[in-house]
Amino acid sequence: MQKIKEYLSKSKLRSALILLILMLFSWYCFFGHKYNIIYNWGDSMSPTYKHKEVLVVQHIDKLENWIPNREEVVIIKTDEERLLKRIMALPKDTVEIKKGVIYINEKKTEGELVSYSLYERSKTPECLTLFYITEEKITVPWGRVWVIGDNRNTSLYGLYEISQIESVVIL
């Protein structure tokens, strides 16, 4: 023990570095396997989460018996990327888009999916390849959720498997 004290007392930088390493190791032992720090990349969740904002997420596989909740912000893993989206509809809920407005279980949600002028242009043949809005009423199948970003004009939306959700945003 005496030798350790002598070794650490020779350099304040060395002592601080070892203390930092011990603190980080302790933090990881208690919290690191459950939580992660990520950067939001993109504007689809703006203004709630801005581009390059730091977020704290909790891994789903560490939550026992986790079931998704409406309005929860989650990280969805696809083949190409990870998406930050808000859960709007759960299994057995109905989703319908009428004139750019989203209805969940026949109730109008806040904000338009897109501005009405963009919605009207999306129905013209030359725009169908650029932007397509379906007006079919769907029922969310068991094992899936319907998600969208808070910035409706720049956000992908649709059905995803619950098994694709890997984290829940907590901060």
Image: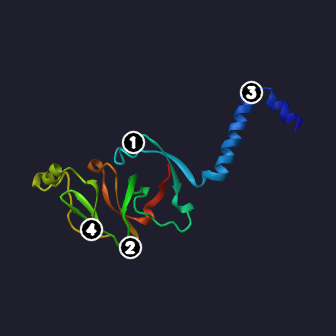
Numbered mark located on residue 12 in the image: 3
The reply to whether the C-beta atoms of the residues labelled 4 and 3 are less than 8 Å apart is: no
Residue 154, image x, y percentages: 28, 48
Residue at 43%, 58% in the rendered image = 72
Of callouts 2 and 4, the N-terminal one: 4
Mark 3 is on which residue type? Answer: Lys
Numbered mark located on residue 106 in the image: 4
The residue singled out by tag 2 in the image is 142
Residue 30, image x, y percentages: 66, 52
Mark 4 is on which residue type? Answer: Glu
Left or right of 34 on screen, residue 150? left
- Cα separation, mark 2 vs mark 4, equals 19 Å
Of callouts 4 and 1, the N-terminal one: 1
Instruction: Note whether 117 is above or below 138 in the view shown.
Output: above
Mark 1 is on which residue type? Answer: Lys
Residue at 42%, 57% in the rendered image = 76
Of callouts 4 and 3, the N-terminal one: 3
- Cα separation, mark 4 vs mark 3, equals 65 Å
Instruction: Note whether 145 is above or below 16 in the view shown.
Output: below
In which quadrant is the N terminus drawn?
Answer: top right
- Cα separation, mark 3 vs mark 2, equals 59 Å
Q: Nearer the viewer, mark 1 or mark 3?
A: 1
* Neighbour tally class for label 1: few under 14, some 14-19, many 20 plus, Cα within 10 Å: some
Of callouts 2 and 1, the N-terminal one: 1
Residue 51, image x, y percentages: 39, 41
The residue singled out by tag 1 in the image is 50
